[in-house]
Image (cartoon, helix red, strand yellow):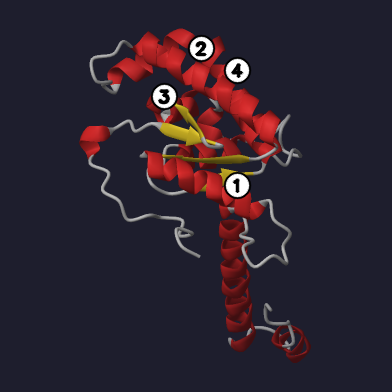
Amino acid sequence: MEGSALIHMLDYPDSGLPYPMFFNGEELPGWSSQWHLCSLGDLLNDFVDDPGKGWDEFIGYQHIWHLQCRIDHVGSIDSEDPTIFQVCAQEVLRVMLLNRDHVTRSIERKGTNNMSGDEIFIQIVIGIARMLELCARDRCAFWTSGYEEDRTRVLNWMRWTALPPGDSAYCEAPHLAKRRSEQIGRVKSQLSDLRTVAQTGSLEKRLQQIISQLPDHH
């Protein structure tokens, strides 16, 4: 499928940063995706959930960390479950507004092309708010930053993933494909480790047999 690669070979010189962001096909200011400027880890326990409150919640600060690491990618299409995106983006918005002075100082320390930290703060807030609106409207979350061609690629991915799975043009959303690949890799690695333990002779024969009969991943 032409243009279906996650990463497209275009030239993205650093001089163009921050590139326009395209969220669900709509162009947003480039600063919208620059969450890393806000030092969110300082405000979210270094992305570790409160063991007394959030230990049993599926969506936690680690999700925000992963999303922050992906939200500003240039030239690669990414996505997220819309509800997970909403929870994470709303938490980012909440801590930014509650800690505006801290976030603004963090932005200013990192250098921002002669723009004031407060101006960039406002652009990030406006951008996140619009992402949330688009996420609620479309019931999906796809994005990249780059050129107009990249906007088209985002729209294509949205269209392909909306098709029935049996359709020849259907494509899995990027975040689903990546997570499946990570899970398969981890299953195989764990199984290899278990078999190594079983072969060391430290286990009695009955346990060795149980481990040796664990199924391969299919």
- Which dot, 4 or 1, sits closer to the camera? 1
Query: Horizontal and vertical percent for residue 180?
Result: 62, 62
- Which dot, 2 or 3, sits closer to the camera? 3
Q: How far, Cα to Cα, is label 3 from label 4? A: 20 Å
Marks 3,4: beta carbons within 8 A: no
Horizontal placement of 82 versus 106: left or right? right
What residue is shown with label 2? 99
Query: Horizontal and vertical percent for residue 165?
Result: 72, 62
- Which dot, 2 or 4, sits closer to the camera? 4
Marks 1,3: beta carbons within 8 A: no
Dot 2 crowding, Cα within 10 Å, few <14, some 14–19, many 20+: some
- Residue 119 to residue 23: above or below: above
Q: How far, Cα to Cα, is label 2 from label 3? A: 22 Å
Among the two numbered marks 3 and 4 on one chain, the one whose residue lies closer to the N terminus = 3
What residue is shown with label 4? 94
Dot 3 crowding, Cα within 10 Å, few <14, some 14–19, many 20+: some
- Which dot, 1 or 3, sits closer to the camera? 1
| Secondary element at image label 1 | helix
Q: How far, Cα to Cα, is label 1 from label 3? A: 21 Å
- Mark 4 belongs to which amino acid? Arg
| Secondary element at image label 4 | helix
Among the two numbered marks 1 and 2 on one chain, the one whose residue lies closer to the N terminus = 2
What residue is shown with label 1? 158
Marks 1,2: beta carbons within 8 A: no
Q: Residue at (74%, 87%) from the top-left corner?
A: 213
